[in-house]
Image (tube, helix red, strand yellow):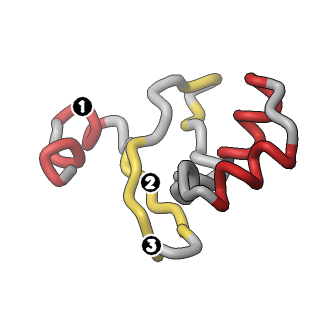
Amino acid sequence: LEQVFQDPQVVARRMRQTVRHSSAGSVDMVSPPVRFDGKQSDIRMPPPELGQHTWEVLSSELGLKREDYDRLVKAQAIG
């Protein structure tokens, strides 16, 4: 990642942003490259924890029922 943050384009556009993560502390990220009216877009959320959105994705995209999800968690198929 240090090579990414040293890239001339990233440096020139000041695209390095630091966000607070609940378990990782401070995390440096590359901001979105799009600017509107010359203003940089801020990163609004840190990267998710492993499995943080598993229930939301499986239920909304696959229609998984809660009892099936719980069964998968108990079987350690998902976390």
**Residue at image x 54%, y 68%?**
21
Mark 2 secondary-structure assignment: strand
Secondary structure beneath dot 3 equals loop
Which residue is label 3 attached to?
Answer: 24
Identify the residue shown where x is 52% and y is 62%. Answer: 19
Callout 1 touching callout 2 (CB < 8 Å): no
The residue that label 2 is drawn on is: 17
Name the residue beneath numbered marker 1.
9
Alpha carbon distance from label 2 to label 3: 15 Å
Q: Which mark is residue 65?
A: none
Viewer-nearest residue: 77 or 8: 77
Instruction: Tell me if mark 3 has few (under 14), some (14-19) or many (20+) residues whose alpha carbon lies within 10 angstroms of its own.
Output: few
Q: CA distance from mark 1 to mark 2?
A: 14 Å
Mark 1 and mark 2 lie on one chain; the one further toward the N terminus is: 1
- The span from disc 3 to disc 1 (Cα, nearest Å) is 27 Å
Q: How far across and down, in percent of the image, does residue 46 sit?
A: 57, 56
